[in-house]
Amino acid sequence: MRLGIGLVVAVVAASLGVSVAVLPVSGLLPAAAGDRAAVELAALPPAGPSIATCAGPVLAAGRDTANASMLADAAPQALTDGAAGGVAPETTTLRAPDVADGAGPTVLTVPPTDGAVTDLAAAGSATVAASDLSGFAASACTRAAMESWIVAGSATTGAADLVVLANPGDVAARVTITVYGATGPAVPAAGAGIVVAAGTQRVVPLAALALGEENPILQITAAEAPVRASLQASLTRILVPGGLDQVGASAVPTEQIVIPGVPVVTAPGTAGESDVVTSLRLLAPAADANASVVILRNGGAGGATSQPQDVALTAGIPLQLDLSGLEVGTYTVVVTASAPVTGAVRAASGFGAGSDFGWFAAADEVTAPALVAVADGPVPQLTLASTSDTAQTVGLTGIDGERTDVTVPAGGSVTVPVTAGAVYRIEPGDDGIRAAVTYATGGAVAGYPVPAGDAAASAITVYPR
């Protein structure tokens, strides 16, 4: 079937959640016989609103003795947000039918300014201290997507992890969850055809998708409308809660991933003989791959802290790599592979009462000025990492308008203190940057990568026939 250029643009734009004005295009004739040069057009849709969807309140299961499977809000999510030009975002709340009297996650929206997309940043945090759930969680509020990769969680004894799907749009989404586990990828019955109605949040227990899986990785694909996918991870050891986190999507598989802002808060040898404080979870979803893992110490002169570690990845099967032995500090993990991979690092402050853990996802590259919201929490830091061959100067401007220039060494990373509850503007160098916000104390371990700015969205490439 042959589609007109206007229809192609409309279909592609609709899949991205934006609207376009379809205009007639003249002068597009079929290519002459033998002329195989592809014609391509850059179609830039009219600027639409910037929308960020948050993880929502921390959830707890089993608090209703009459209905042990019912979820309840355990703690609200405190939000920090800001938009370019000081525009105040409009906030709405999604319905949460799977949560008894649930408050639901917040959606923030700002309209375009003077015909251009307005940058928006938001992040949230929550603290819980209860007999069944304890710890600190922080996550960025992000755009909904048609595909998301969640690299986090466990479905073994003691874990009570939840997959959270939020649909901020006006059209229902049909979601499929593919679980990558010890035997490869599979779509379980509970992960097929999940309907997320417009303006609602759905919650699926990870145990219903991957019971017994120790290192699952989830590919979440949506049809009809994009969704914002996240995972709430929590752990209990012998009736003692051992931390929690709200984990957003990791970077889509690519041949090099960068995980900035990984904290180590426990000195080597003090966590227990059989416990792993810090570990890297990796997946090559489509093909076998050889991967090289390099660990950079932040705040130093740049360069690896040890020799690269080479690992072999089997297509479709997650691999867990022990990173214990690192000294206390903040690190960036760089993975370079022969085939596309995705991954994240889990870091813990301990394994007893009052300890916490967090998942640190692979970050997308920030190539244009972007805003970053620093959620409320203890001692936040911003890590800037570069894979460039030359040093970069990154501008960091606070809400007071004062700019600080940060030099990121070639192939290195640096960490700078930031203010909780503040919004900053990052201006990367010519080669782009990866960035993440990190919290690391004995009772609060969490972090999230900085998303690329809304205003940095590129044009849609259309190939007419």
Image (cartoon, rainbow, N blue to C red):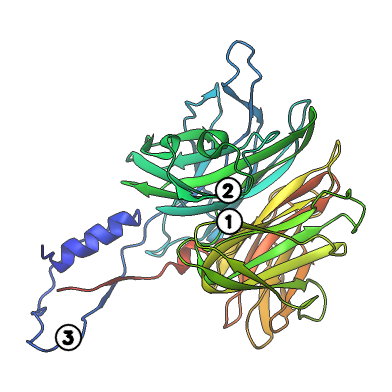
Name which of mark 2 and mark 1 comes first in the sequence. Answer: 2
| Label 1: which secondary element | loop
Image quadrant in which you'd find residue 16: bottom left
Q: Residues within 10 Å of mark 3 (few under 14, many from 20)?
A: few
- The answer to which image quadrant residue 9 occupies is bottom left
Horizontal arrangement in the rendering, residue 275 relative to residue 257 (left or right): right
For label 2, the crowd category at 10 Å Cα-Cα, with few meaning under 14, some 14 to 19 and many 20 or more, is many
Percent from the top left, x then y, of residue 352? Answer: 86, 39
Q: Nearer the viewer, mark 3 or mark 1?
A: 1
User: From mark 2 to mark 3, how far is it between C-alphas?
Assistant: 44 Å
Circle 1 residue: 318
Determine which residue is flagged by label 2.
Answer: 216
Q: Amino acid at mark 3?
A: Arg
The location of residue 395, given as percent across then percent down, is 66, 75
- Against 351, residue 447 (above or below) is below
Q: Find out whether the residues at labels 2 and 1 contact each other: C-beta distance under 8 Å.
A: yes
- Amino acid type at circle 2 is Pro
Q: Is residue 40 left or right of residue 431?
A: left
Mark 3 lies on a secondary structure that is loop
Given the image, on which type of amino acid does mark 1 rest? Pro
Image spot of residue 132 (x, y percent): 74, 27
Query: Quadrant location of the N terminus?
Result: bottom left
Task: Please indicate, yes or no, whether residue 421 appears anywhere in the rendered image.
Answer: no
Q: Residue furthest front?
A: 183
Residue 115 position (above or below residue 30): above
> Looking at the image, which residue is at 69% across and 38% down?
234
Q: Which residue is mark 3?
A: 36
